[in-house]
Amino acid sequence: MPRKIITEELKQEIIKYYLSQPMTMKQVEDKYELSHPTITKILKDVPKYTKAKLNNPNMKEHFFKEINNEASAYFLGLLISDGNVFKDGTGRQASISITLDLKDEYMLEKFKEVLQANTSIGYDGRGCGQIAVRSNIMAEDLAKYGVIPRKSYSTYLPQISKEMMPHLIRGIFDGDGSIMAKPNPNNDGHDRFLHSISFCGTHQLMEDISNCILENLGIKAAVYDYKDRNLSELKIQSIHNIAKFGYWIYINATIFLNRKKDIFNDFLKHYNNILVEQFKKEYETIWYKN
């Protein structure tokens, strides 16, 4: 076979082809039937695709660059509470993962969907599922909001727009929060109902949620520090405050853990939705004008 002449036009065609989508050098070599040294020389000034990009060519690595929609705000909150960023120091791309109970596996599928990732969900054999993607770009964007390796001792509430804040808090709540709303079995014939909402996390994060969010909503909450543990708990207990908080995090929401939303719906049924209807009238004034 005669030797192929490498013209400037051919070089530009090869570069354009390589940049058209993530691919290996071998794919370019096979496409143009040229040797590895030749292709390496032609592409020497072109940034190469990482292994993570080759394995996940359509993944939205810049998904968290701006927190400007429900999905980015919600999953930022879920990563703050239930996520992990890991760097092994070997030069590999950072790993970003979320681990949830198997009954919430559909949320891992949702995360995979919004990222357009082709990563498989893994299982630990103890009732949990995990999705992990690799991207230094995503890790760097998340670091701006405090989602960093070994974040358990340092999480805080990041500053994002008021429009996106309910989705962020809902993500944190779905990760490390709980809601109780059920009849009291020892009610002595009275119509009593056990109800509470709580969060668990760093003292800083709990104080931030209490002072920066709940106070602006007119919601009273208490923050308790666990003895001998670097964890605190935020608790909302009054009927009116639970109603306000639930309405606020679920307004216009399409992404949430169904089991927690179902419990809040049970709470509303018990109190005939009256409390939420009252708060709806106050919502715009309370949140957006504070």
Image: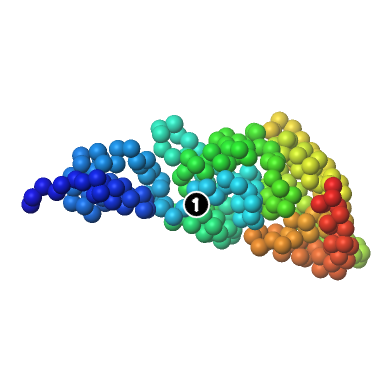
Q: Residue at x 76, y 39 (%)?
A: 208
In the rendering, at what x and y percent does residue 153 appear? 64, 33
Work out whether residue 8 or residue 91 is closer to the camera in this orientation and state it: 8
In the rendering, at what x and y percent does residue 200 appear? 71, 43
For numbered disc 1, what is the local secondary structure?
A: loop
Q: Is residue 14 left or right of residue 186?
A: left
Q: Residue at x 68, y 50 (%)?
A: 168
Decide: is 143 above or below 164: above
Decide: is 226 above or below 54: above
In the rendering, at what x and y percent does residue 237 appear? 84, 51
Q: Is residue 134 left or right of residue 181?
A: left
Q: Is residue 17 left or right of residue 213?
A: left
In the rendering, at what x and y percent does residue 234 appear? 77, 43
Q: Which residue is mark 1?
A: 60
Q: Residue at x 71, y 48 (%)?
A: 161
Q: Dot 1, how many residues are within 10 Å of its Cα: few (below 14), some (14-19), or many (20+)?
A: some
Q: Quadrant of residue 284?
A: bottom right
Decide: is 202 above or below 265: above
Q: Is residue 170 left or right of residue 123?
A: right
